[in-house]
Image (cartoon, rainbow, N blue to C red):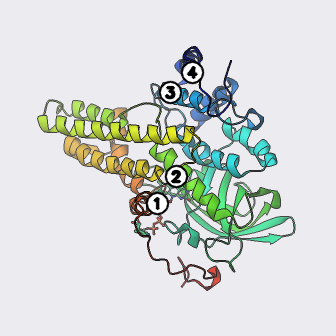
Amino acid sequence: MTDTSNTGKLSTEEADAFATRCRAFLTEHAKPGQRRNIAAAKEFQGKLAEAGLAGLTFASEFGGAGLSSEHERIWRSVSSEFPAMTGEFVISHGMCLPVLNEFGTDDQKRRYMPDNIAARTMWCQMFSEPGAGSDVASLQTRAERDGDEWTLNGQKVWTTLAHESDFGVIIARTDPEQPKHAGISMFILDMRAPGVDIRPIHQIDGGRHFNEVFFTDVRIPAANLLGEYNNGWRQATAMLMYERVAIGSAGSGSISQPMYDILLAGARSAGRVDDPVVRDQLMEIYAMETTKSLVAMRTRAEMKAGKAPGPGGSLGKLYGSVIAWRFREIAMEIAGPGSQAWDTTDGRAAELQTQVVGSFSSSIAGGTDEIQRNIIGDRVLGLPRDISVDTGVPFKDLKVGTVR
Ligand SMILES: Cc1cc2nc3c(=O)[nH]c(=O)nc-3n(C[C@H](O)[C@H](O)[C@H](O)COP(=O)(O)OP(=O)(O)OC[C@H]3O[C@@H](n4cnc5c(N)ncnc54)[C@H](O)[C@@H]3O)c2cc1C
């Protein structure tokens, strides 16, 4: 019998049967070279939902498969043997979905989760502003209640895939009389609502992955308040923890070394694979990635045991960016100028170049390395916290971010 509790154990036969089912699906539908193809990801996820394998641990009433975290672990393990198909849904599924599930009303969950899980809709996260990134509680985008609606004005920035998204999870200031962490609420925003203006930001690697988003008198139905009024900071913190786990523990079903694989291919094509120094460097990345996999597996195991993702997620997130930086140094030594020159016709080389150029973003996206170190210092190691100068001061009396 299938175990639908979140913590129950599967028998060996049940686990094997489920792994076989996952493998059969992936063999048929996971195709190489589609990692950044949103249309392919939507098609794949739609088929996954039809097969009853999408949103594994979410309740079937809300579009999930209603299975256990053990099923999820098996899925992760099997899928790590196949090409990644839904990388572009890391925010939609890894962050927005658990937040909807944790804080949404049953009506909101019924309305939004099934489409999200099956990738009929895509979601983005709208936290950062020009004056509020690391200190996101300084945000100035405001939502004012007006009858049965809220009116939203302000600006977000660095919103990944806003231009592809149907909905966004947004935090806005709803009470400037409160101290800065207390007067924030979270909303579900229809990205096509009148007054939402999405402008792309062009990246060094030629991509257009994120955006500035401006809001002018955007109307949000009162029913789209997500969670409690003025409780947005607590919910945002929960979402940031899901984010660190989603980024830091990506592909954590088994021990894997994806950056090592890219470097090895780069070393082979540069004819350097027998160079003892290069071999040392390759093994360094291999060992780092192995360690990261083990940390990620521990984080996932804690979640499976019912623990909400805690500050320990910062460890995996930080280590991922340490690896990305070391990867860049080694790739530049091995491939020289070829590590950064664009060659769109050579898929393997382009992969190495994209990783080299993109390595900088891993230290910023999802919270900078310095902020992860602060969190680890404060909440994992128990070191004294940074001095706070604005505790208890109403937000309207603060000079924050872009306020002069
Ligand atoms: C690829 C990418 C995708 C992103 N996607 C999204 C998204 O989808 N949605 C979203 O809302 N945001 C997104 N962001 C924004 C990201 O969350 C912010 O850029 C990040 O939190 C840093 O904020 P900031 O850019 O304002 O830098 P700042 O906060 O201004 O930081 C500048 C520098 O000061 C340091 N610093 C700041 N405060 C401290 C402190 N207390 N102690 C020590 N050092 C400190 C920082 O570490 C950094 O080096 C994305 C960013 C990137 C790069």
The three-letter amino acid code for the residue at tag 1 is Arg
Secondary structure state at the residue bearing disc 4: helix
The three-letter amino acid code for the residue at tag 2 is Gly
Q: Going from the N terminus, do you reach mark 4 or mark 1 first?
A: 4
The mark found on residue 79 in the picture is: 3
Dot 4 and dot 3 residues touching (CB under 8 Å) = yes
Residue 350, image quadrant: top left
Cα separation, mark 3 vs mark 1, equals: 33 Å
Q: Going from the N terminus, do you reach mark 3 or mark 1 first?
A: 3
Secondary structure state at the residue bearing disc 2: loop
Dot 4 and dot 2 residues touching (CB under 8 Å) = no
The mark found on residue 310 in the picture is: 2
Q: Which of 111 and 384 is in front in this view?
A: 384
Secondary structure state at the residue bearing disc 1: helix
Residue in the image at 22% along x and 41% along y: 335
Q: Going from the N terminus, do you reach mark 3 or mark 2 first?
A: 3
Q: Where is residue 242 in the image (x, y as percent from the top left)?
A: 56, 49
Please, is residue 268 above or below residue 102 in the view?
above
The mark found on residue 379 in the picture is: 1
Residue in the image at 69% along x and 54% along y: 191
The mark found on residue 22 in the picture is: 4
Please, is residue 81 above or below residue 122 in the view?
above
Dot 3 and dot 1 residues touching (CB under 8 Å) = no
Residue 189, image quadrant: bottom right
- Viewed as shown, does residue 357 lie left or right of 21? left
